[in-house]
Amino acid sequence: MLRDITPIVFCTTANNWVEVPCAQTPNVSLTRKKQTGSDESLSMEHGMKQQNDFERISTLNILADCWPFFVELAICSKLRYEWLAREVRRLDATVLCLNEVSLSAIERIMADSFVRENYFVSEWGNSSTKESINRTIGKHGCFILSKVPFESLSAFEWSTPATQSNREVIVARVNLCGISTVLCATHSSHRQKQHQKREQQITELKQAVEADAKYGDAKAFFILGDLNVYSNSEDGMIVRNGMLDLWAETHFTGTAPFNDLDPGFTFDSQTNLMIPRYVPGHTRRMRLDRILMREHSLLRPHSKCTIWANESVDPQHPEVFPSDHYGLSIEVARAAAPTVGDPAAAAVLEQHAHEEPERHRRSLYANTVSIGLHCGWLLGRAVGVV
């Protein structure tokens, strides 16, 4: 089920974030009613972004800050969000889709001058009162920042018994490289055993958005975010839904330089030193996050899909990473003809689909030892020793 929500942009005159109509040309002044009833002209400083040869689309699960205090000892959210605010500036994405965003994270991100000067956003709220304009954030939720105006903006709720979730998808229609484009910032259900539910969620989302009058005629369509793809065997859902995995399309092909077969782990307990600090004993490496594009879209990959947010946020705290996830980013360009998938990349995904789901079980002894060591480390962190 889709419900319309309101885009938000920073107004220099009001020195605050304000709501703007979808497809409102950002160059014009908005007129709003004061509480007294008189008109107030609100000058919007955002200029219309020039149409580029390519645009950058990025996604990251930022790891929410609403966990118990002993988890917060390990994940240091304040430090991570300070880094994120700076990294948004460096990344300079045209559209950035984030998962697990709390209202306090939104406040920090949107306090940055670069964000205020360059982005329309899908939500704004107050972490003290827990109130938000579009009601898309519970404990945490999905959030979109876009340099180009939202032509349409909605929240999608999985509502059938088979797909129900309390995490809404944020659906945006924008113009990228002159192509009407729909992006769905998505956070699918977690836990490995829910693989059938995840596929049903992707199918329901795609069908609902394509059937909606505001989005159905778009020439490019993306589903991106933390899709919680725990096992390679779940890759079959991508093919069955007529989607292209843009990591596979730029790393698993038969043509150089897009054939390096880099596995593209976005949850990697071997390289992300923060994961074992808050999930004791975790050893898995998974490609949980994806950027999927509908086959026959009129956009194409302009460069390799890359990983970002994959280094420590502070040399003095090498165990603190931006998140337990790494982010994905890709540049897309206008396609001369509808984009079809690379046969070699499709073959890899089909092969994965026929594999047995990966099993990861640890003994009671191993779990006990890991938790014991972890408790000792947490005590050290609490008293400032580590």
Image (spheres, rainbow, N blue to C red):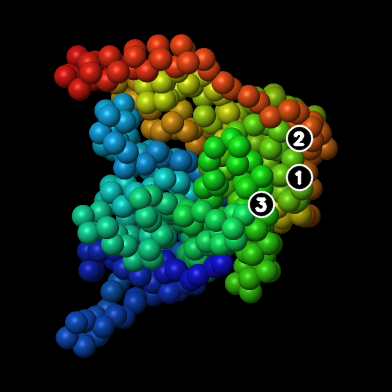
- As displayed, is residue 97 above or below residue 282? below
Q: Mark 2 to mark 1: distance in Å?
A: 9 Å
Q: How many marks?
A: 3
Amino acid type, residue under disc 1 in the picture: Val
Q: Mark 3 to mark 2: distance in Å?
A: 16 Å
Residue 353, disc: 2
Amino acid type, residue under disc 3 in the picture: Gln
- The crowd level at tag 1 (other Cα within 10 Å; few <14, some 14-19, many 20+) is some
Marks 1 and 3, the one that precedes in the sequence:
3
Marks 2 and 1, the one that precedes in the sequence:
1
* Residue 79 is at least partly visible in this image: no
Which residue is denoted by mark 1 in the rendering? 239
- The crowd level at tag 2 (other Cα within 10 Å; few <14, some 14-19, many 20+) is some
Residue found at x 69% / y 37%: 234
Which residue is denoted by mark 3 in the rendering? 200
Q: Mark 1 to mark 3: distance in Å?
A: 13 Å
Of badges 3 and 2, nearer the viewer stands 3
Judged from the image, the secondary structure of the residue bearing numbered disc 3 is helix
